[in-house]
Image: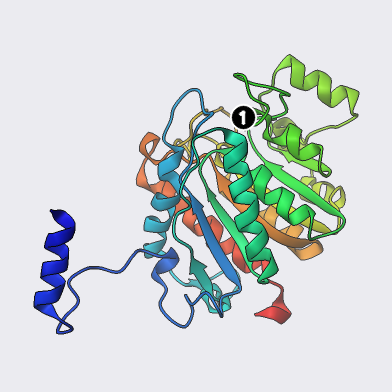
Amino acid sequence: MLRWLIVKILFTMGNKEQAFLPRRVFAGLVSPYSDLEKAKTVILPIPYESTTEWRSGTRHGPQAIVDASQYLELYDLELNWEIYKVGIHTLPEVEPVMSNPKDMIDRVYHITKGLIQKGKFVVMLGGEHSLSLGTVQAFKETFSKLSVLQLDAHADLRDKYLGTKYSQACVMRRISELCPIVQVGVRSLSWEEKQFLNQHKMTPFYISELASSVAPAEKISATLSENVYVTIDVDVFDPSIMAAVGTPEPGGMQWQQVLNLLRLVALHKHIVGFDLMEFCPQEGPASCAFLLAKLAYKFIGYAIPQDKR
């Protein structure tokens, strides 16, 4: 009945006027800056959650970030540049596969692989953190000397959790089997994960070190390889500015601290893509969605090399 009514309305109106608002896209961009063919950057929204175990709602995160991005100032004061001019195309939301997490990861892999082959800079908006395995698999096949920079309150290094090896609590364990990882902002992990770190001689940049070191950003950048994929679980931020997460942890990173790190890494390394994951908009104020929209926009500005703008 609803579909019939829409068709009748459109038939009656003809081409005299537009009855429906256009689909919301990142930053509200219009052609030519939002055109897929010309855009250097693509926003890949994936409203998926399956293995979260406390506060749910990450499936609503991508659209909330896109909605908040409508209110961005397109001129960036820090960079003295209108970042959108690189071209930013927003893809439709990816339909979730609910059979099992591995099938969904495979879907993300194939989509990301296709975008990389088209020369696009991919920004994934999640959705639960397990999805990052799919994007990293695609980038690993394309870029040699790839490492992954993880900003996260949690280590996510369990071998298996709640019956699956592809839980969001296992994502960095799986990624570490593909390429080196550098973990930043961690302040919560299990004994199993601590033993894994010790056995493999891996030392995260714990939040305590970030607070005490005089030059943590330089140390972090130096541990990364030439090509870097950045995965950001938004609970890396302190809950005072990012309450809208499924598993909050006190004592996190602050806004300027994260920006300083990302800017420095982008200056010295080749950022191949990044993601923002585990955002639960209903768990916090609207300012959280805007913070993440601005973070995505600024990071695009950091990551796109000057000679490609």
> To which quarter of the image does residue 164 belong?
top right
Rendered location of residue 72, percent (x, y): 42, 65
**What amino acid is found at the position of numbered circle 1 in the picture?**
Ser
The residue that appears at 21% across and 68% down in the rendered structure is 20
Q: Which element type, helix, strand or loop, lies under badge 1? A: loop
Q: Position of residue 113 (x, y in %)?
A: 67, 59
The residue depicted at 74 percent of the width and 56 percent of the height is 139
Give the x, y percent position of residue 223.
Answer: 86, 47
Q: Quadrant of residue 180?
A: top right
Image quadrant containing the C terminus: bottom right
Count neighbours of disc 1 (C-alpha within 10 A) and say few if under 14, some if 14 to 19, many if 20 or more.
Answer: many
Q: Identify the residue shown where x is 60% and y is 50%.
A: 108
| Colour scheme | rainbow
Can see residue 253? Answer: no
Is residue 101 among what the camera can see? yes
Q: Nearer the viewer, residue 189 or 147?
A: 147
Left or right: where does residue 254 sit relative to residue 119? left
**Residue 61, placed above or below residue 114:** above
Counting every numbered tag in the picture gives: 1
Residue 70 placement (x, y as % from top left): 37, 64
Say above or below: 214 vs 212.
below
Q: Residue at x 59, y 48 (%)?
A: 107
Residue lying at the far left in this picture: please name it.
12
Residue assigned mark 1? 167
Of 291 and 145, nearer the camera is: 145
Horizontally, residue 86 falls left or right of residue 20, namely right
